Amino acid sequence: MIWKPSDYAGWGRALKASGDVARPERRAQAQSLSAQTPAPAMGMRRSYGDAALNSGGRMIDMTRLDRMTGFDPATGLLEVEAGARIGDIAAAFAPRGWLPAVMPGTGFATVGGCIAQDVHGKNHHHAGSFGQHVAAITLLQHGKTVEVSPDTPLFRATLGGLGQTGIILKAVLRLMPCKGDVMMVTERRAEDWEEHLALLDGSTASYTVGWLDATAKGATLGRGIVEEGETGAGLVKNRTRFRKVPMDAPHFALAAPVVRAFNAAYYNRVPARGRTLVKPIGDFFFPLDKIHDWNRLYGKRGFHQFQCVVPLAAAPELRTMLEDIAASGLASPLAVLKRMGPGRAGYLSFPMEGYTLAIDFPNRDLARALILRLEGRTADAGGRLYFAKDGLGTGARIGAMYPELADWQAEVARADPDRHLETDLVRRLNLRNAQ
Amino acid sequence: MNTTWIILGATSAMARAFARRLAAEGAGLLLAGRDMAELTLLAEDCRLRGARLAEPLTFDARDAGGFGALIARLETEEGELNAAVFAGSMPDQSLIDADPALIGGTVTDSFTGPAHFLQLLAPLQEARGGGTVVGVGSVAGDRGRIGNYVYGAAKAGFHTYLSGLRNRLTRAGGHVVTVKPGFVDTAMTWGLPGLFLVASPDAVAGDILRAVKKRRNTIYTPFFWRYIMLIICHIPEPIFKKMKI
């Protein structure tokens, strides 16, 4: 069997698709699929919305092409297939003093997915985006391998390019030296919005991220915990215990009072004077990976994640958005605030210098309406939405959010003229047509 | 101690997962199969994951003439010599019904080819006073069913062979683990209808490695297949012969 009729979903499980999926286990199979039945590629489907969905069409699952095929310790250049998972690379290389230079919030993300979304990590303010550490990409276009080097239009169209320039087969990543496979993590309380931003602005750590209590209102609006991390060696770390969510949780599992209580406890567990801990690398970078299938906590209706970035000067607008979220009572415990640097590698890369806010909402009518309001406010503030998360955007203001959209469209039209690689997200946001 | 594994059928998903776990422990790996391009990629991957040695080699169950060279290569490694057999083929039963000549190849791939190889290896393991053999069979070998009884028969033969080999190698300090996987998420099962509780190749590989360390004789993986097969094997034949499971 090559094609398996499948029902599959984005990570948020609110958007679903049905269609035939092929999963090549050998390179030659991927090549012949690309030649004979070109279709969009997908990895571990950690994008929340519909970036890796193709309703009624075909998909090529790349997760079995996941080998590391060359490493040069003199330069840190690692050649790796697109299906390899970031967490696996980190686990194999951190003990030898190397890490992927940029790691997203889940280690289950594949290299192909990190390229297609030009992801960022907790060190974006220093290291920039994932694509800025990619030294080469090999695409499959119509069965032929195409080598893509940095500083070419095809490279910029591929980084953050949502898989529209070809199937990503492999890439060369420039790993970053690290001290070892443990993290020294300092956690500090931020009592309100101003203190939260001040802590993020003032942080000099390599890795910085803020957890936000999105249920806090009034004087405590914006309170949270700022985590700063540095890699370390020779320290004793706790064992990571993995847990699994065995079934869909009932809808009240994340009801407002539960979330408020959880958030208060989560906030108070860090002493007022702060604390420093030693953690395994995975616990710091991929905190939720310990709970397999945590997306089932939102029940069978699933959830949406809203993530935007706004320019530094638009911090007051972001605060207004947070007020709206807090007032709605719809927020979940997962809310993240981070200061980003300007680094980005592609025409459609998400990052811009400013503040990014990411927050989960259960998939309800009120939450969908709220997310649409937040989308409008993001556009008004001169910010943009993140395609890795978006599942509801209308596309009307995408052109304003992504000023290089036309450059991307021109390159994609050359790479995939017959539109074999379009996904649900690309169609929903009308990305490949003139806006 | 220096251990070296030869893995037959190394490009299969289960074999890849098993090789990676061995690599992380620093073992030496001889990765044998037919697709040299894929084996070369896997070998590099295993080296980067910590294998002391990872080398691609050609193995074709239907070409016994090539076995000697593999044995000779293995013999050059010092220390404990182990083998894991993941080779096998499962043509659709309807194809076999249409062309009974396919039976020969299925039996060679899944039973007699690997058995021939292990038979050449056994004296070497005896001479070194130990070593482990992992033989991957199948729950399909526990009872013949309409859906895949030729493949099942080949695996049943392999199980019996492994049990005899275990009897032999035990005397020399060696050990044989018979592995009976249920449904595993591999190319062989991709898109087959009616599968349930499908295990990941990595979970199966973890079970196999645990069984090797504990010197278990026969394991089912995932474990509950032992009970499923216990029930299936105890259905009286007059009833079983009318069932389609």
Image (cartoon, helix red, strand yellow):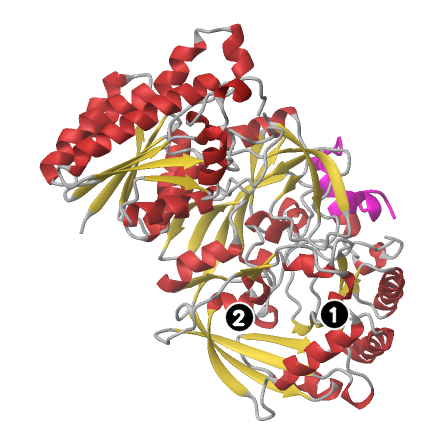
Please state the horizontal and vertical placement of residue A72, each as a whole percent of the image. Answer: 37, 52
Q: Nearer the viewer, residue A2 or A309?
A: A2
Which chain does tag 1 point to? A
Name the residue: 49% across, 6% down. Answer: B99
Q: Residue at image x 43%, y 53%?
A: A77
Q: Is residue A425 magenta?
A: yes
Q: Nearer the viewer, mark 2 or mark 1?
A: 1
Is residue A306 toward the left or the right of residue A178 in the image? right
Residue reaching furthest to the bottom = A273
Label 2: how many residues lie within 10 Å, few (<14), some (14-19) or many (20+)? many
* Residue type, label 2: Phe
Instruction: Estimate how packed mark 1 is, as few (under 14), some (14 to 19) or many (20 or more) residues with alpha carbons within 10 Å.
Output: many
Q: Quadrant of residue B66?
A: top left
Residue A162 in percent (x, y) is at: 69, 47
Q: Which residues are drawn in magenta?
A: A408-435
Which mark sits nearer the N-terminus, 2 or 1? 2
B219 up-or-down from A202: above or below: above
